[in-house]
Amino acid sequence: MLPTISSDPVVAALLGADGPLDLLVRWRRLERFTGSPHGVAFQEAGERALLSEHTGPPGASPEPAEDALVLGVLTILLTMTGARGLTVTVGRDDPTVVFTDGAFTAPPLAADISMWRFTWQSWAIRPAPAPPARPDAPARGADPVSDVVSRARCLLGGGLARRWTLPVLACELDTSTRSLQRGLRGAGGFQGLVGTVRAEAAAELLLNSEYAVCLVGFACGYADQPHFTREFKRRTAVTPAAYRAAFARRAPEGRTEHNSMKEGPR
């Protein structure tokens, strides 16, 4: 049974996809993190259809059971993230319907189930989370720059797996790109703030969860394991694995990643 609790960071990273293609892009990123020898390759992508193939190295194709497992998980994720009227077929020359009207049907035993076509009638766009509220009249002495940084951090932290850009963040904060760029200078700029927010979230999971390091990196939006290791070490002076080993076991109850990151490795 696929976990659906919002507190699961890996599931949340997948369910945050804004469309079928984005979901499969996130799934492929997860495959890179887990080091799977098999992966989902795109063949065609249209407005209401996706054709993909589950492949592997020469002479090491996925077993039918693995094909079926990955296909089932992706089908469930597509319905959960907004696909309406979803139909899934498998096979190349004579496709067989294996999912329609919300129900799975087992394919013939001899069927090739490594080639998948997903088609849907519509995509239910979920409303984007509202940006942090901004008072109409800031309190006397309030720092508008700190307000912008705080609201930006909140949005970035709520969508770690999203491919953020400065214009997209500015749009969601209802400000201009130039104004946001100026406002974020003191926080290391846009890229610096994104990196900091991701590193803090990763530190939280490393300290307070038992997720494998690779899954922590995926959930926090890093491109792959080398990217996670390199960027995390740049901000903490240690690799993710070393950070967990140094702090997780002896962190006092209630201690947050912010304190640990500031103190540095011991």
Image: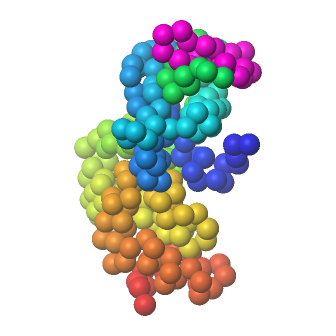
Identify the coloring: rainbow
Which residue appears at 65% of the width and 78% of the height?
A: 254
Verify whether residue 102 appears in magenta: yes
**Viewer-side residue, 33 vs 227:** 33
Which residue appears at 55% of the width and 12% of the height?
A: 95
**Residue 199 visible in the shown view:** yes
Which residue appears at 50% of the width and 81% of the height?
A: 245
Look at the image and tell me in which quarter the N terminus lies.
top right
Residue that lies at the very extreme toward the bottom in this rendered image: 266
**Viewer-side residue, 159 vs 172:** 159
Q: Is residue 10 left or right of residue 102?
A: left
- The image quarter containing residue 165 is top left
Please provide the residue range marked out in magenta: 86-108
Residue that lies at the very extreme toward the top in this rendered image: 94
**Viewer-side residue, 194 vs 221:** 221
From what the image shows, is residue 166 above or below residue 34? above
Query: Where residue 28 sits: x, y (%)?
Result: 44, 41
Verify whether residue 210 appears in magenta: no
Query: Where residue 83 sits: x, y (%)?
Result: 60, 22
Which residue appears at 38% of the width and 73% of the height?
A: 239
Question: What is the number of callouts on the image?
Answer: 0
From what the image shows, is residue 198 above or below residue 65? below
Query: Where residue 220 sits: x, y (%)?
Result: 47, 55
Q: Is residue 205 left or right of residue 189?
A: right
From what the image shows, is residue 171 above or below residue 228? above
**Residue 39 visible in the shown view:** no
Look at the image and tell me in which quarter the C terminus lies.
bottom left
Query: Where residue 261 sits: x, y (%)?
Result: 44, 77
**Viewer-side residue, 252 vs 239:** 239
